Amino acid sequence: MKTFSATPADIEKKWIVIDAEGVVLGRLASIVAMRLRGKHKPSFTPHMDMGDNVIVVNADKVQLTGNKRQEKHYWHTGHPGGIKSRTKEQILEGAYPERVLTLAVKRMLPGNRLSRKQMTNLRVYAGADHPHVAQNPEVLDVKSMNSKNTRSVN
């Protein structure tokens, strides 16, 4: 018996919509990363882009557990005195709240050419509307997958 290896003719991609409202960021990012890679399919082949096209809406309403919302994230611009910092709360309330989820998913994928191509199949929107209605995306209810996916706000 031979090991199955998918060819481009075997790949069937679907469109999936995920509502991120109230879902914990890390759990959501791991589910999205799995869908982008195609690991949920029985015909998964590591060297092929088998994943689905994933649309995430309400990315600005994603939840963070513990004290992660107020923790600072530091980076350096490369210039003298160029250390900068922001909290995730500032990013979520700023001009590009999608970046928090996009970077979380990107960091859960391997750092190679294939994962950079798979990241082009991810579309993240801060609001509830998206322009991909013509693709007839299926709704994936991440909240109901596990009771820990939602965080109760005290």
Image: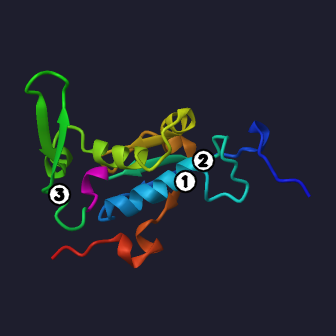
Q: Is residue 61 magenta?
A: yes
Q: Residue at x 44, y 65 (%)?
A: 142
Q: Quadrant of residue 25?
A: bottom left
Q: Are marks 1 and 2 in contact (CB under 8 Å)?
A: yes
Along the line of sight, the residue nearer the viewer: 129 or 93: 93
Which residue carries the number 2 mark? 51
Horizontally, residue 3 falls left or right of residue 154, namely: right
Horizontally, residue 59 falls left or right of residue 86, namely: right
Q: Could you say whether the residue bearing mark 1 is in a helix, strand or loop?
A: helix
Screen quadrant of the C terminus:
bottom left
Q: Residue at x 40, y 69 (%)?
A: 143
Bounds of the magenta segment: 59-63
Along the line of sight, the residue nearer the viewer: 135 or 84: 84
Is tag 3's residue or tag 2's residue first in the polypeptide sequence?
A: 2
Along the line of sight, the residue nearer the viewer: 83 or 37: 83
Circle 3: residue type: Arg
Q: Residues within 10 Å of mark 2 (few under 14, many from 20)?
A: many
Is tag 1's residue or tag 2's residue first in the polypeptide sequence?
A: 1
Report the residue that reaches farthest toward the right.
Answer: 1
Q: Could you say whether the residue bearing mark 3 is in a helix, strand or loop?
A: loop
Q: CA distance from mark 3 to mark 2?
A: 30 Å
Vertical side of 135 occupied by 76: above or below? above
Q: In the image, which disc is placed on residue 35?
A: 1
Vertical side of 68 occupied by 124: above or below? above
